[in-house]
Image (cartoon, rainbow, N blue to C red):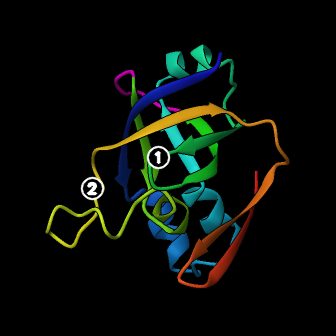
Amino acid sequence: MGSLSGLLITVRTARQGTEMVCGKSTPKYLDEISTVRLNPEDLAELGLAPNQSALLASAHGEAVVTCRSTEGPLGLFFMPLGAVANQLFSAACTYGTGVPEWKSLKVTLSRYEGQCGHQAQNRGESYEHSS
C-alpha cells in the first residue's frame, strides 16, 4: 500500500467539455480536472476507495487528485488536461517539439494523508479544489 508507478495519459472528457462552457473556474470543472481514473485493481493495491485523494507525482511536479475507477489496463492512469495536470509536465522537456508528453508521462500514485484541499497553479492563476 505504498505507491504505484505507471504512465499518465491526458485526455479530454465529455464532462470536462460540458463544464468548460460554464467556465474553467467553476467547482464542477475544477472537480473534473482534478480526477485521475485508473483500473480498480490498481486502486485496491493502494488501499484506496473511489473518490479518495491521492498524490500523483512526476519528475516535474506533483498534484493532489481524486481517484476514480475505470476500465483500462493496469498501470495506466487517465487524467483530463488542465491546470492540475499541467503541474506534472515540464515546458522545457518537449524533445524539441514544443509540446509536452501528454500521452506517456511516467508518474507515481500514492496515498495522500493530508487535508482534502489543494491549489493548482497555472500561469499565475490560482484554482481552488476540495475533494
Location of residue 54 in the rendering, given as x and y in whole percent from the top left corner: 66, 38
Q: Say the numbered circle drawn on residue 24.
A: none
Q: Label 2 crowding class (10 Å Cα cut-off): few <14, some 14-19, many 20+?
A: some
Q: Which residue is mark 2?
A: 101
Q: Is residue 25 a member of the stretch shown in magenta?
A: no
Q: Which residue is mark 1?
A: 58
In the figure, is residue 89 to the left or right of 127? left
* Residue plotted at (51% across, 75% down): 20
* Residue plotted at (70% across, 25% down): 49
In the figure, is residue 76 to the left or right of 58? left
* Residue plotted at (38% across, 63% down): 90
In the figure, is residue 50 to the left or right of 41? right
Q: Amino acid type of disc 1? A: Ser
Task: Indicate which disc, 2 or 1, sits on the residue closer to the N terminus.
Answer: 1
Task: From this view, report whether residue 68 is shown above or below residue 45.
Answer: below
How many numbered callouts?
Answer: 2
- Distance in Å between CA atoms under marks 2 and 1: 12 Å
In the figure, is residue 73 to the left or right of 88? left
Residue most toward the right?
115
Location of residue 51 in the rendering, given as x and y in whole percent from the top left corner: 70, 37
Residue most toward the left?
96
Front position in the image: 56 or 11 = 56
Magenta segment: 69-74
Location of residue 123 in the rendering, given as x and y in whole percent from the top left corner: 53, 83
Q: Label 1 crowding class (10 Å Cα cut-off): few <14, some 14-19, many 20+?
A: some
Q: Is residue 72 a member of the stretch shown in magenta?
A: yes
